[in-house]
Amino acid sequence: MLLNPSFFYKYSLVKQLPIFSQLGWLELHRITSKSIIDEYKKGDLIRKEGDPADYFYCLVSGRLQAYSKDEHNHKRNVEFIHRGVYFGIISLFTGENHSMTFEAMNDSVILKINKDDFHDILKAIPRLGIEVNQVLSKRIRRKVKGDDAVFDSTVISVYSPTKGTGKSTYAINLALGLKKETRKKVIYVSIQPKQDKREEGNVKEDKLRNKWKVDAVDLNEISDDHEKIQEHIIRDDLPVDLLNIYFDTDDPLVKNKIAPFVSDLIGEYYYVVVDLPNSRDNVVLETLTQSDLVHLVTQDKNSDFEAIRKIIDRLEEVLKEGFKEEKIRVIISGIHPEEYLSFEDINKFIDYHVYTKLPFLKEEDMEIESSFKSLNYVKIRKMNQYNKVVKHIAREIGKVLVGLALGGGAALGIAHIGIIRVLEQEGIDIDMVTGSSMGALIGSLWVTGKSADDMEKIAREFEQRSSLLGLIDPILPISGVIGGESIKKWLKKHLGNKTFYDARIPFKVIAYDLARRQELVINGGSIVEAVCKSIAIPGVFQPVREKDRVIIDGGVMNPLPTNVLVSEGIKKIISVNVLQSPGDILAGFETSQKKIKERNKIGFLKSPGKYLKFKLGRMVSSVFDFNISDIIVNTLQAAEYVIAEQSAQQADVAIHPDLVGVEWYEIYKVNDLIKRGEDAARAVISDIKKLVEEKE
């Protein structure tokens, strides 16, 4: 939309732009007289690829995305344009059509000068031409070197329509988490109505809350002035920069100040975390619509859900096709210990997907951090689960998630417990777990809150070989040794009725639909049901029939699901392949034969105890040795190993424990398997730490 501002207003805009800031009054006057000011809404196209050169363009406020498109209409060569940057200059000089499309990512104001007028200005002001050429040369050199110095910023608005949700505690801790996890510049901005300008939010009915020690500044005073905004930013106090803003709710024009204000911060900070007031006015709505991510924090109450649904409806109405569910997150506050509704019930109530629930915070979990000059904020004690959830969210936003793929391997998967124990001991936080077969079973226990020590105790339930017989429930017609009801009962004993929403770490289980020959990635519903599908080893377990699906062990086609982590955008991947290589199998066979020969030399009279123990062990083993189940499993694992090795190439750290001499059914070798897992993890722990500490 073409604006018609006064000459003096245009002059003030021109003077603030870096390219013109060093010019004299007469030169600025000349440029101002030839300038046009245009306003574009979020999603508008300024120029399209192939359009003829027409103007010199310079972004006054807002944010643009520049890109070209390939033959499939996909964006490529994406660049980001921030305040003060001019664009389309190559076309202006060469006369060729624009090679890129320029799209407004936020409401934007652009200064334009007709191409003929701009050429006249360059002739009249030679030093301006030199400046343009120097900047253009730097841009070209950056492209040749592949060094893109212009980064994309992310604006995250945190909002709750009701008080007492702890949204300000969440907002400041999210900002600090982003700084810690990405090591990039972050600013925390508090925007509050005039009457609340010295305090923000509340927690635990105001017993603990964030509190500013500095006065807030009026949004009207600084929104159009870059220097004033910079002057009021608080630096070198907290690890993140701070800005405390208030606005007058009685001013109908104040909402127009939001877009230029936010865009001024975009060029300097990778992450702008905006803590909004609880009011539902135009300032709040305008900020939400100008944000890249919106986190809606709500209590577990019907009245709050109704308010959240209204906000979602309003955003859908304003953003139209720009509304994307992955950008608008609903977060359940951890203020109250009671869970009145399940995640599934909340989803139905608001007809929207709940992103996560913040863990319940007791008063002893929190303390006021008062050592800083500008802000007292609610600090969460380090080892609290709340911190881990916020850390995961920060990593997701920062694209520095760490994923763990746990492979299948029947009893060999007990080694996963040793791997997990080392991760716990070293404080390595995992953001997503994928599991096939035994990897799904071990993963399910871990993500629902069981520690490595807990899982070791659970594994010891099968330390007596005779306990394996308790899992066998014969079925007719015969489609496996184990029907599955006994194992399901055992899983329910340890997992209860937990669903994927109850997982403290996002979790995905891999199964395989034999009827369609299709991989299944399960991340919803009952965890027990999902695990039963993933561990249905052909020839051992009965397949799980679900409508027209015949579901078997996920390891058959995807024994090491690193691909699922990649598809989720996770760039830091740790994989654990417990399957044995052909060399491992051969070495194990030779070792086994030697042991059998040695033990056969022990007679009953010489050592009756050892003799009977050996014979009993052989008898139990003979149930599995080269029967139909043994043949099927060994055949499958031979093929799965090859697939798993290929999948491991997608991992940054690939762990392959030495499990020579252990058979697929020897689940009773708990100590040995866990120890071997620990040894394998310890061997690469320095690589894992380097991976986790790497920033994008």
Image (cartoon, rainbow, N blue to C red):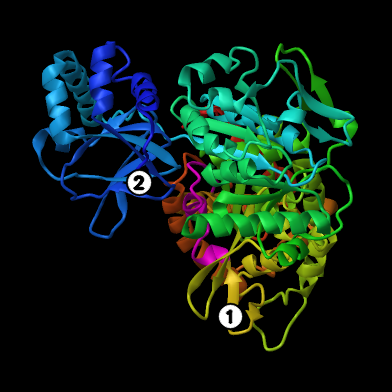
Above or below: residue 424 compared with residue 19 = below
Along the line of sight, which residue is nearer the eye, 625 or 24?
Answer: 24
Mark 2 / mark 1, whichever is N-terminal: 2
* Residue located 24% across and 31% down the image: 143
Q: Secondary structure at mark 1?
A: strand
> Disc 2 marks which amino acid?
Glu
The image shows residue 448 at horizontal and vertical percentages of 75, 51
Residue 599 falls left or right of residue 42: right
Query: Residue 508's quadrant in the figure?
Result: bottom right
Magenta region: 554-576
* Residue located 62% across and 52% down the image: 662
Within 10 angstroms of label 2, few (less than 14), some, or many (20 or more) residues?
A: many
Residue 643 falls left or right of residue 133: right
Above or below: residue 475 compared with residue 558 = below
**How much space separates mark 2 and mark 1, taking CA atoms?**
46 Å
Query: Residue 14's quadrant in the figure?
Result: top left
> Disc 1 marks which amino acid?
Arg
Q: Contact (CB < 8 A) between labels 2 and 1?
A: no
Would you name the residue on which mark 2 appears?
103
The image shows residue 166 at horizontal and vertical percentages of 78, 38
Q: Secondary structure at mark 2?
A: strand
Along the line of sight, which residue is nearer the eye, 624 or 512?
Answer: 512
Front of the two marks 2 and 1 = 2
Would you name the residue on which mark 1 appears?
549
Above or below: residue 268 compared with residue 676 = above
Q: Is residue 201 magenta?
A: no
Along the line of sight, which residue is nearer the eye, 488 or 344?
Answer: 344
Within 10 angstroms of label 1, few (less than 14), some, or many (20 or more) residues?
A: some
Along the line of sight, which residue is nearer the eye, 57 or 358?
Answer: 57
